[in-house]
Amino acid sequence: MQDVNVPVTNPELVHAIEALQKEINADTQDVYFKAIKNARFLSPVTIVPPLKPDDAEGKATLEVDTKISFVGFTEASGVSYLPVYTDWSALKQWRDITDEQTLITSYDDIRALIQNDPNIAGFVINPYTHNIPVRRDVMNNLDAGPATRWTAKEETEVAIGLPANDPVAMKKAIVKHLKSQKNVNGAWLVLMEKGGEFSFLIAVDFIGDITETFNGIVAVSIPNLRQGELLDMIEANSDLGRQIMRDYQPFYKRKTLGFF
């Protein structure tokens, strides 16, 4: 437990949240995810028995039987979250008391707590100001790297079709992102089975830099992938990509101006 008398501030995370709320794109999401992983949060706790300072500086020693319980809250739907705060000002929006008990926690600390308790769906950053939820599925994918290109070879056996569980939230996030991109003409999503492994496969019709284009889509897709779900992408201008464009409808198509 760190000294809570030392001011806790997270200007990088606060700025990243505010930038993300203004515009969701690959850059703002990348900065936001990195800031979460580097943050030090204030987590409200209940300590029993209460700590008694050992000296004039307010330092205290935990007794053997001391119990520390993290404060959580439950939504009307029955879903529980852990609240975390970026600074004392944000914490006081919840309640302003002089003897507030808190621990300074890292992202890894919070993740471990949530992974050990299946009843907790995630955590919420500054619930009374920014109110940013970070769900369990987002945490499971927070460490995922950028998308890798995968090209089907002629001898590779691949089966594609429409997914039984349509990833609506992910497609909406991608569409919102692509509307701000001038280089993507269309995007198609199917379910791919390759070597016994299933993944969502997105064929992208674009011009320009493939790394920037694909990583931008990945940045908005990862938070909406559920645990165990995988994502691959290919260029629409490939053998498999052209097959997908021929047999399936795009979930995104760039609007073009017509003249008459």
Image (tube, rainbow, N blue to C red):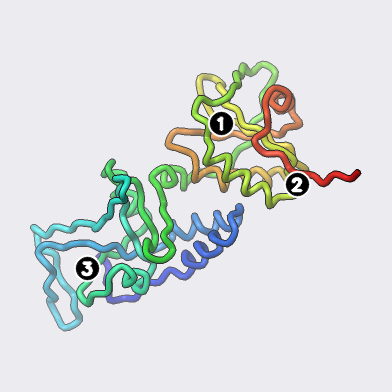
**Which of the image's four quarters has the N terminus?**
bottom left
Check disc 1 and give the amino acid type.
Phe
Question: As displayed, is residue 121 above or below residue 241?
Answer: below
Residue pointed to by mark 3: 101
Residue pointed to by mark 1: 200
Is residue 115 found left or right of 194 in the rendered image? left
The residue carrying pointer 3 sits among few (fewer than 14), some (14 to 19) or many (20 or more) residues within 10 Å by Cα, namely some
Label 2 vs 1, first from the N-terminus: 2
Distance, label 2 to label 1, CA atoms, is: 22 Å
Viewer-proximal residue among 2 and 251: 251
Q: Residue 183 shows which numbered tag?
A: 2
Q: Secondary structure at mark 1?
A: strand
Is residue 128 found left or right of 16 in the rendered image? left
* Residue 178 percent coordinates (x, y): 67, 46
**Which of the image's four quarters has the C terminus?**
top right
* Residue 235 percent coordinates (x, y): 71, 34
Distance, label 1 to label 3, CA atoms, is: 45 Å
Viewer-proximal residue among 204 and 145: 204
Q: Residue at x 44, y 58 (%)?
A: 36
